[in-house]
Amino acid sequence: MSVNAIRQFEIPSESDPSKEYRVMYDGERWYCDCMSWRFNYEHKGQKDDQGRAVPRTCKHTRLAEVQLRAKGERAGKVIQPIGPWFEELQEYTKTLVEISRNGKVTAEKVFAFRRDIERFQEKKSEVADALLTADTLLDLSLALVKQLSVGV
Ligand SMILES: [Zn+2]
């Protein structure tokens, strides 16, 4: 399994300049954490000529697309995967987007999806714990260097 690296863009909200939306591009699909993308407001019920829902977009994905076209490799930032589970999660989200274009799943499938997500959340928590520990180690190291620097 291999997925493309995610290119991430921070697109400011038009209505609230203190807010930013996170737009992601995996080389094929665009994702955004705004409500419009989540609920597919712009394309609800819209089908392509094969009868599938048209790919999700929102004004933020379109703005990011303009940036990508203008700046190429310098647009946004590339997010490096932090473990095999991260790439698995990317693949997983991509699959859910595709399934959501095709329509219905069974109740059992929904249950299984929720279990998968819990498993990913556990993996994420482990990384979050490690980052907190890194913060503490950095704090302690800084304090020690400060003490060592007295009288140098
Ligand atoms: Zn959006």
Image (cartoon, grey):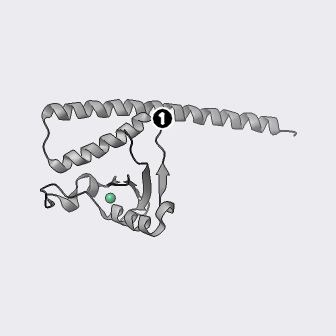
Q: Is mark 1 within 8 Å of ligand 1?
A: no
* Residue that appears at 33% across and 42% down: 91
Name the side, left or right, on which 51 lies relative to 59: left
* Label tally: 1
Q: In this view, does 107 lie above or below 51?
A: above
* Residue that appears at 23% across and 53% down: 39
Name the side, left or right, on which 142 lies relative to 110: right
Give the quadrant of ligand 1: bottom left
Residue 2 location (% of width, % of height): 39, 41
Name the side, left or right, on which 100 lies relative to 151: left
Q: Quadrant of the N terminus?
A: top left
Rendered image quadrant of residue 140: top right
Name the side, left or right, on which 13 lies relative to 41: right
* Residue type marked 1: Ala
Q: In this view, does 96 lie above or below 119?
A: below
Residue 75 location (% of width, % of height): 48, 62
Check disc 1: other Cα within 10 Å, few if <14, some if 14-19, many if 20+: few
Helix, strand or loop at disc 1?
helix
- Residue lying at the far right in this picture: please name it: 151
**Which residue matches tag 1?**
128
* Residue that appears at 24% across and 57% down: 55
Residue 123 location (% of width, % of height): 41, 31
Which of the two residues, 81 or 10, is positioned nearer the viewer here?
81
Which of the two residues, 13 or 72, is positioned nearer the viewer here?
72
* Residue that appears at 74% across and 33% down: 144
Rendered image quadrant of residue 58: bottom left
Which of the two residues, 103 or 115, is positioned nearer the viewer here?
103
Q: Quadrant of the C terminus?
A: top right
